[in-house]
Image (cartoon, rainbow, N blue to C red):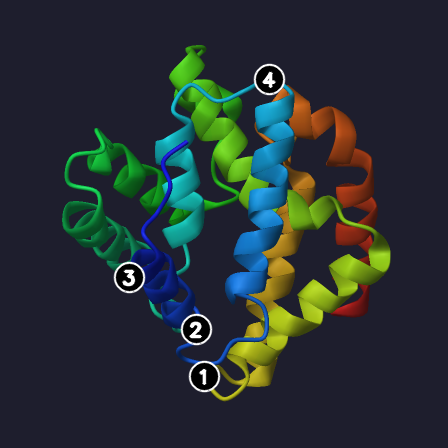
Amino acid sequence: MIALPAPQLAGIEAAYAVPPRAYHDFGHVREVLRHYDAVAAGPGWVQPDEVRLAVLYHDAIYEPGRKDNEARSAAFAVADIARWLPDAGVDAGRVAALIELTARHGSFSPADFGKTAVADDTCHFLDCDMAILGAEPAVFDAYDRAIAAEYRGHVPDWLFRINRRRFLKALLARPRIFLSGFFHERLDAQARANLRRAVTTKR
């Protein structure tokens, strides 16, 4: 695994602090890295360095309500890889592509990525980011409140509730919440219980 230079890591952590965030901060990255490690110890990664960098950068640029957060985070990642890891053999395009896919959470099915080992990486990466849906109820509820807090002041409360409930209901209606078998088998039941509860409380 590539060791990141200290200034690069410091720059990433600094990016996650601006603007101040209730959920999409570096604590979120640490949690996604925990799931990344679980995949590494289980089915494994084909491109571990690229996926780890995608985890580190995927929400580096985050302003609630903007449509280009993922594209800007991907561009930030590509620039940093060129600056700090020019000779590390990292596929920066792959890192950027993974980050940009996070803009479409909840719209994919496993068939969208095929049955290759690289496709498995994609599914596992996206599932790592969405694993919070299958967290214990208290952890999920804290996440749900934090998302609402991030949008407060950016979107009218009534509109946020409508859009959030629509998104959660759409997830609940999908035959697969998680794209990979690794996450589906462990987290689907808890995720559905959490989503049902959240949808009910947002009426």
Residue 198 shows in this picture? no
Closer to viewer: mark 3 or mark 4? 4
**Residue 26, image x and y in percent?**
51, 63
Label 3 and label 4: CA atoms lie apart by 32 Å
Would you say 94 lies left or right of 15 here?
left
State which mark lies toward you, 4 or 2. 4
Find disc 1 in the rendering and name its residue: 154
Check if mark 4's residue and mark 1's residue have beta carbons within 8 Å: no
* Residue 178: numbered disc: none
Q: Earlier in the sequence, mark 1 or mark 3?
A: 3
Whole-angstrom CA distance, mark 1 to mark 3, is 15 Å
For the residues marked 2 and 1, what is the alpha-carbon distance in whole angstroms? 7 Å
Amino acid tagged 4 = Pro
| Rendered position, 105 above or below 10 | above
Residue 47: quarter of image: top left
Instruction: Give the residue type at disc 1.
Output: His
- Left/right placement of residue 184 relative to residue 20 reads right
Q: Residue at image x 82%, y 42%?
A: 190
Q: Amino acid at mark 3?
A: Asp
Q: Work out whether mark 2 precedes mark 1 in sequence or the reverse, and give the earlier one.
A: 2
Say which residue label 3 marks.
68
Task: Identify residue for label 2.
Answer: 64
Q: Are marks 2 and 1 in contact (CB under 8 Å)?
A: yes
> Measuring 43% from the left and 13% from the top, which residue is drawn there?
117
Residue at position x 68%, y 64% in the image = 143
Mark 1 nearby-residue class (10 Å; few <14, some 14–19, many ≥20): few
In the drawing, does residue 42 fall left or right of residue 69?
right
| Label number found at residue 43 | 4
Image: 107 above or below 43: below
